[in-house]
Amino acid sequence: MGARRLVFGTRMPDASARHILIAGPGRSGTTLLVELLDALGLETGAERLKYSEESRAGFEAELLGPEVPRVVKSPALSWRLRSLIETGRFDPARVECLLVPLRRLDAVAASRVKTTIEQGDLNADGGMVGRGQPGRQPALLAELIYGLFETAALYELPVVTLEYPRFATDVDYAYRRLRPLLDGCSPEAFERAWQSAIDPALISNGLPRAPRNAGLRVAFMRTKANTARRLRGLRRGLTGGR
């Protein structure tokens, strides 16, 4: 990523600041969207956020943290946002916009399953959601997305949707969709930022395939993780918790 316009120091959270929230099913260009908004000069905090080269995922921020940028990317908000609002921990008036990149559900599900298996980690960034089998991923993702839009409707949150990979391959489309957030940015300036942020070689236009025997492989990973957890418990018991 290029040079940042803003550098953050430690500060108390601003209870009046408004935020652009990036949520949705994930594996739909959300990380790329952070990079694009960063190139456009929006405050993303990306320089201090975790990023995985292996899964090309990251830049996720904590909405309730001490250093909250204007742009907050967190697919977990798809299921957490309503609870945060209902419990009074977050004021819906602070949502400047809810940005939701969308992609074919079967593509999102296959990408998440593939990431989980390739990294051998049930908690991999950009991996499977929930504890269901790989075949349940499309249904789980659809439920999460519906819940997010229901929250937006209930609390009258402004929403902008973008289709992936179109916003990464069609600069005019991307500009039209993001223009309300760009404070008068010209089409020419937007195109320069878009070209600097997007590597065409990394854009997936096809339908990713989940690895063969994905269900068995995920089941094996869970068995292995459970066995390791039990062994750690036995060791702690034998050593008196030392």
Image: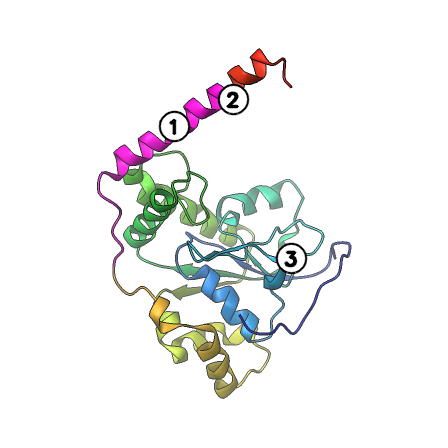
Per the rendering, the mark at residue 224 is: 1
In the image, residue 124 above or below residue 100: above
What secondary structure is found at the residue carrying circle 3?
Answer: helix
Quadrant of residue 18 within the rendered picture: bottom right
Q: Amino acid at mark 1?
A: Lys
Asked if the residue under mark 3 is in contact with the one under mark 2, i.e. CB atoms within 8 Å, the reply is no
Q: Amino acid at mark 2?
A: Arg
Tell me residue 5's x, y (percent): 65, 74
Label 2 – label 1 distance at C-alpha? 12 Å
In the picture of the structure, the residue carrying the numbered disc 2 is 232
Label 3 – label 1 distance at C-alpha? 45 Å
Could you tell me what secondary structure mostly forms the magenta stretch? helix
Q: Read off the magenta span.
A: 207-231
**Label 2 vs 3, first from the N-terminus:** 3
Q: Is residue 220 magenta?
A: yes
**Label 2 vs 1, first from the N-terminus:** 1
Q: Amino acid at mark 3?
A: Ala
What secondary structure is found at the residue carrying circle 1?
Answer: helix
